Image: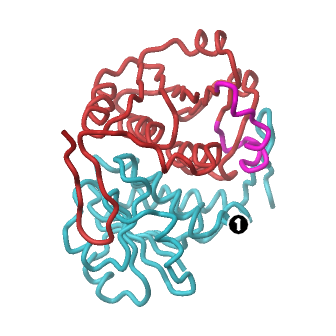
Chain colours: A cyan, B red
Amino acid sequence: MITILRIGHRIQRDKRITTHCALVSRVFGADKILVDTLDKKIEETVLSINKRFGGNFEIITGVKTKKIIDEWKGTIVHLTMYGEKLDEAVKKIDTKKNILLIVGAEKVPRYIYEIADFNISVGNQPHSEVAALAVFLDRITKGKWIDKKFNGKLEIMPCNKGKKVITNK
Amino acid sequence: MITILRIGHRIQRDKRITTHCALVSRVFGADKILVDTLDKKIEETVLSINKRFGGNFEIITGVKTKKIIDEWKGTIVHLTMYGEKLDEAVKKIDTKKNILLIVGAEKVPRYIYEIADFNISVGNQPHSEVAALAVFLDRITKGKWIDKKFNGKLEIMPCNKGKKVITNK
C-alpha cells in the first residue's frame, strides 16, 4: 500500500499543483493522499473524479505531519532533487511493506530528510513534484499502474482519433 | 529533436502548471518549449534555471499555434487521456524525425486531434499534463534523460541524507 503525504500545501498558491499530485497518485497506483493543510475544495475535486471515473482512492486534508510520520509502520520515502538516484534507490525498497511517500512544496524542513529511510531524486535538477511523483510511482509499480481497473461510470477507450467514452450502468 | 507546444495557456490560472511543463521538458530530454500565450514571467523563470543549473533549453512564448503546426516538418504527437495506449503508440514513433509534442490546458480544439499523427494517452484517466509529459518523455527517451549533462554553475550530487551542491567555476 502506498500513501502520499503532501506537505507545505498553501491553499491559494498550491491548489492546482496539489490537485495534480492527488490525481497522479490516484492513477499511478497509490491508495491514498494525506495533505497537511485543510482544503475541502481539493477533497471535493478528487471525490468527484472518483464518482465519475471510479476507484476508491482516498484523500484526507488537514492531517498532522509529525503524527503521521511518528506512527508510520513501514518505509518512509521522500522525493527531493537532492536525493539519491532513482533507479538505484528503487531497487532497495521492499514493496511488500507499506510506503509513505512524502512530497513537499517549496522548502522542506530538515527533519524530513533525516527521518526518511530514503531520500530519492527523480533527476538532480529542479522540475516538478507532480512529475517526480508520477515517475517514481511508475518505477515502483514497474509500470503496472497502467493496467489498474477503476470500474467507473465513465470509461475512456483508447483511440487514435477523437474521443470514445463509455457510460457504464 | 523534441519541441513541446503548450496550448491554451492562461497567464493567471496556468502559470505554475505551464512552468512545471517547461521545467519537466527541460529535464526529460526535450530541446524547446513553445507557449501560445505571451508570458515573459515564465520565460524569465526558465532562463534563470538555465543560468544556474545549465543546459540550453529554449522557451518562446506568444507563438501562433496554427503556423507552428502547418509548418512543422516531422511528427506531431498530442498527449490526451482519450488517445491510444502509451507503450504501444511509442513504439510506432520514428525518433529520428523531429517531434512536435502538443500539451493542452483544459479543452483542446478538435483540429488538434485531427492534425496529430498520434494522439497518445498516459493512462485513460484524468490526471495531469505535467505527469503525462514526464512519463511520455521518459518512454520516448528510453529513460536516458536521466544521464543528460547540463554543465551548470550549480550541480547537485545525489545523496541519501542532506544536500550536496557543487558550485562550478
The residue indicated by pointer 1 is: A148
Quarter where residue B157 is shown: bottom left
Parent chain of label 1? A
Secondary structure beneath dot 1 equals loop
Quarter where residue B18 is shown: top left
User: Mark 1 belongs to which amino acid?
Assistant: Lys
How many numbered discs sit on the rendered protein?
Answer: 1
Provide residue B112's location: percent of width, then percent of height.
68, 24
Residue at image point 63% right, 16% down: B69
**Nearer the observer, A134 or A94:** A94
Provide residue B95's location: percent of width, then percent of height.
69, 34
Q: Which residues are magenta?
A: B79-98
Which part of the image, by quadrant, shows the N terminus of chain B?
A: top right
Provide residue B68's location: percent of width, then percent of height.
58, 13
Apparent side of residue A24 relative to residue A130 in the rendered image (left or right): right
Quarter where residue B110 is shown: top right
